[in-house]
Image (cartoon, coloured by chain):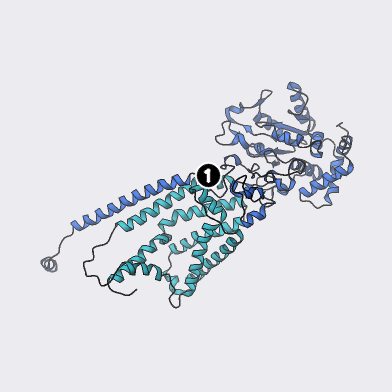
Chain colours: A blue, B cyan
Amino acid sequence: MKPHDTLAEHLQSQGISRRGFLKFCAATASMLALSPNMAGAIADALGKARRPSVIWLSFQECTGCTESLTRSHNPSVESLILSAISLDYHHTLQAASGTAAEQAREQAMHDNQGEYLLVVDGSIPTGAAGGYSTIAGISNLQMLEETAKHAAAIISVGTCAAFGGIPYANPNPTGARSVMDLIHDKPIVNVPGCPPIPIVITGVISHYLTFGSLPELDSLKRPLSFFGDTIHDRCYRRPFYDQGKFAKTFDDEGARNGWCLYELGCKGPTTHNACATAKWNNGVSFPIESGHGCIGCSEPDFWDAGSFYQAISSSPADLSSAATGAVIAGAAGGAALGLYNKYKRSNAKDKHYTVTTDDMEEGSS
Amino acid sequence: MSALELLTWARGPALQAALVIFIVGMLIRILELLLIGRKKDLSAARGGQVGAGLRTIITRSIPVSGTWKQHLSGYVWHIGFIVVLLFYAPHIQLFKEGFGIAWPALPTSLIDVITIVTMAALVFSLFMRFTDPVRRMLSTAGDYFAWVVTFLPLLTGYLAFHNVAADYTLMLALHIMSVNLLLVVFPFTKLAHAVTFLFSRWYNGANAGRKGVRV
């Protein structure tokens, strides 16, 4: 994209028709829970947008978030919008490397001071003075602090950046932290997911470009329009849950009939995300549609929340061993207490003093 | 601490600890009660103890004239509570994965209705405790405490299922925490009557039977 191009012109040169672009804007408006006639406003704003500078920092991550966005299907409006706006610095996607790459980041920061969007994927290791992950000799922590300083807003993409994710999981050897744990003076939007849904990322960016502000967020800084409902609330298998029809194994009759996967450990009820409505692979399906329960990847600490294959209502702790131990301890304790009480009683009996009439007369005189 | 962390803790280590306290507490209380024994009755028996004891365990559950209201609400909520506890599919899953035992579940919509009826009966019981001067005088803080800890699991479970008042994750965590609270206080409050009612009724019945009183 040439710097003077608008987004609309860029998309057109990539073979996206006006109709295709408007369809994307309408879908975005609908996903953001905006009124349908906001699609026009989004199209106007996005169409006129001129190369908003985005710096994308990747820290402790697996590149899955970038992969999800750029390779989901080809070429998507989402990925084109992203490529059109984002490439000031993205070390997976940019051509430059080494000193030139770092110069590009510094240049973008300098040229767009206070205006650029900062996208972060990956958690930030704080152990060993940040030494667990460095880029061009700069620790992730230092790079985040430096780059966040003059950013207009930060979008934490993926569960690692948003909540710490897998690097943060017990025992967290690198002292991994999330962006919102470390940066407190900037507007932050979390777009969690492992990986996150492409349209959620472009939706947030579109909202920012259209309204100049970030969308409404929940208590975990996630856009409410995408993360307001749970997977369970929007799941097409929900009626089976309500009827009490559950698949018991992955290949039984219930599974073949598409019954609810609750008993197989589906975390849909505790997971807020848009998978059930936005879906994956160009709207083909989402994990539950493929017969696997939700693993809850867009929630904080999902990695430490027990097995993916254990129902939420059951206990990750070993209850039967604990109960057996408790029965033994309780029986022993009860028996000991019983014997002690018996001893106390016979002891008291032994100490009984027989009062005779003589004693009583003595007392009264 | 996030809601999910609280939930993971509530259904993991906290539930495990609460279960241990419940079992140890109940066993100690029951064994202590049984092992203390009774002084040998040297008088000649005028009737059998066993039949009278067993009969009393049952007859004390039958309403006598004028008590049908509290018996009805008592029956409704006790049965409702047990049905909801044992026949709601996610609860069965807890028993299945925790202890390896399972049984068929009732439809969720039916459990939903039973929960409402159970809560209504409990509220009615509380209302009667407040409005009847005799019962109000007899009631102690322990009675109200027992009511609250019994009511909370039903209320939080209902709210969690219907996704109201708070986010499901938090409400489910609160639900499990309320159950943990119930388990912990169970052996040490009047709630222990769930088992001890058998002994006290037996004692009264057997005692009366031995004295030749018809029960």
Q: Position of residue A135 (x, y in %)?
A: 68, 25
Query: Could you tell me which chain the residue with mark 1 belongs to?
Result: A
Q: Is residue A346 left or right of residue A176?
A: left
Question: Which quadrant of the figure contains the C terminus of chain A?
Answer: bottom left
Vertical comparison of A40 with B30: above or below? above
Quadrant of the rendering where the N terminus of chain A is positioned:
top right
| Secondary-structure class at tag 1 | loop
Q: Nearer the viewer, residue A115 or B9?
A: B9
* Residue A193 visible (yes or no): yes
Who is closer to the viewer here, A122 or A102?
A: A122
Whether B140 is drawn above or below B1: the answer is: below
Visible residue check, residue A216: no
Residue furthest front as drawn: A253
Residue A261 percent location from the top left of the image = 63, 48
Question: At x 82% / y 34%, what residue is drawn?
Answer: A84
Q: Nearer the viewer, residue A82 or A77?
A: A77
Answer with left or right where residue B160 lies relative to residue A357: right
Total marks in image: 1
Q: Amino acid at mark 1?
A: Pro
Where residue A351 sits, quadrant-wise, is bottom left
Q: Give the percent coordinates (x, y) of residue B185.
A: 44, 55
Q: Answer with left or right where residue B9 lies relative to residue A357.
A: right
Quarter of the image for residue B143 reads bottom left
Q: Which residue is mark 1?
A: A316
Q: Is residue A143 left or right of residue A333?
A: right
Crowding around mark 1 (Cα neighbors within 10 Å: few <14, some 14 to 19, many 20+) is many
Seen as rendered, the residue at the extreme bottom is B65
The image shows residue B68 at horizontal and vertical percentages of 47, 74
Q: Considering depth in this image, is B213 or A176 the residue closer to the camera?
A: B213
Name which residue lies at 76% across and 48% down. Answer: A31
